[in-house]
Image: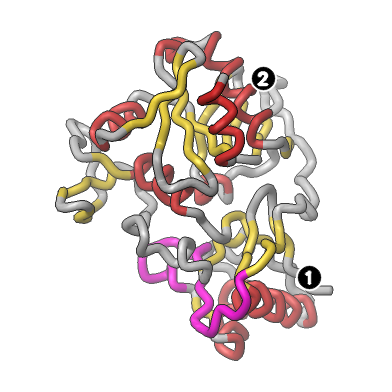
Amino acid sequence: MSTLRFAGSAYNSAAGTRDAFGRLSDDLVAEGLPAMVVLDGDREKADQLRIWYQRMTLNPGGRKVYGTAWWNGQKWYRIHPDAVGVPDTSNHEKRRADDLAWPYNSDTAAHRRAQVLAKRHNITCEGMGFREWWHWTFWGPLGTIGAPAGGTGSTTAPPPIQSEEDDMAVLVTGGGQNLIVGGKLIPLTPADVGAVKGAQVLEVTPNTHYNIIQAFARDTANSALPVLVYVHDGDGTVYALSDGKLRALVDPTTLAALHAQGAASVTLSKAEVDNLIKS
């Protein structure tokens, strides 16, 4: 069995990608280095769109701009320090890329050794070209695209560390990632998750994750904002859920504005969304 592990709901459904990263992890372990842990692997269209809207906007206002990109004939401004691929172009969507946990997410001795060993498996740390040392890509044949391997939560969660205020941070995974700390719910990108140290990990179903977000929304200043609903296996449509009603968002400026205001988001399956629409 491969030493490669997947955290939370991360997965690789392409046999070529999965096996290559598995062999690289085995090589590293054989040399006494830690096994590789995948924080973010394949991304469905809805996942990529969610990250795009979290990091990009059509109207940056007074916020710092880290870069620009063109999509759908419009110029978008990056308001997040981490890059994101234009939808339909990311190697995560192409089932080739994995975002890895420490020590393969920064300039460490283990990372440098992994760069050397990765060559024999047709893998490179593509992210070094855009300051994302955790982003690794497989360039060989994808092979069979089948049942995803991963999402088993097989990695060992780090022990919880209490802050000086005796307030334990909890990382909620499953249909997205959110950090609960100080009585607040903070949305995270997969890249952000790699920087979280010492939080207790709570892995739940997407529907339970949605219920957690709803509970916080009722008690926060942002309760008037709808919850953004992404569809894991849908056609890319994003929905807004408010007062128990689900409506499709067709204007990208509306979606970008809701993200800028801090609207909570969750990723559900198409079946779960269909049930919400019927209810």
**Residue 275, quarter of the rendered image:** top right
Residue situated furthest bottom in the rendering:
120
**Percent x, y of residue 277:** 51, 25
**Percent x, y of residue 249:** 33, 31
Residue at horizontal 60 percent and vertical 86 percent from the top? 121
**Percent x, y of residue 228:** 44, 29
Check the image and tell me how it is coloured.
Answer: secondary structure
Can residue 176 be spotted in the picture? no
Q: What residue does disc 2 label?
A: 165
Identify the secondary structure beneath mark 2.
Answer: loop
- Per the image, is 139 magenta? yes
Q: Quadrant of the C terminus?
A: top right
In the picture, measured across the screen, residue 222 lies left or right of residue 39, that is left
- Depth order, front residue of 42/109: 42
Can residue 71 be spotted in the picture? yes
**Percent x, y of residue 253:** 23, 33
- Per the image, is 17 magenta? no
Identify the secondary structure beneath mark 1.
Answer: loop
Q: Quadrant of the N terminus?
A: bottom right
**Residue range corresponding to the magenta coloring:** 126-145
**Residue 147, quarter of the rendered image:** bottom right
Residue at horizontal 42 percent and vertical 43 percent from the top? 50
Distance between the alpha carbons at the discs numbered 2 and 1: 37 Å
Select label 2 or label 1 by which is in front.
1
Count of labels in the image: 2
Q: What residue does disc 1 label?
A: 3
Q: Amino acid at mark 1?
A: Thr
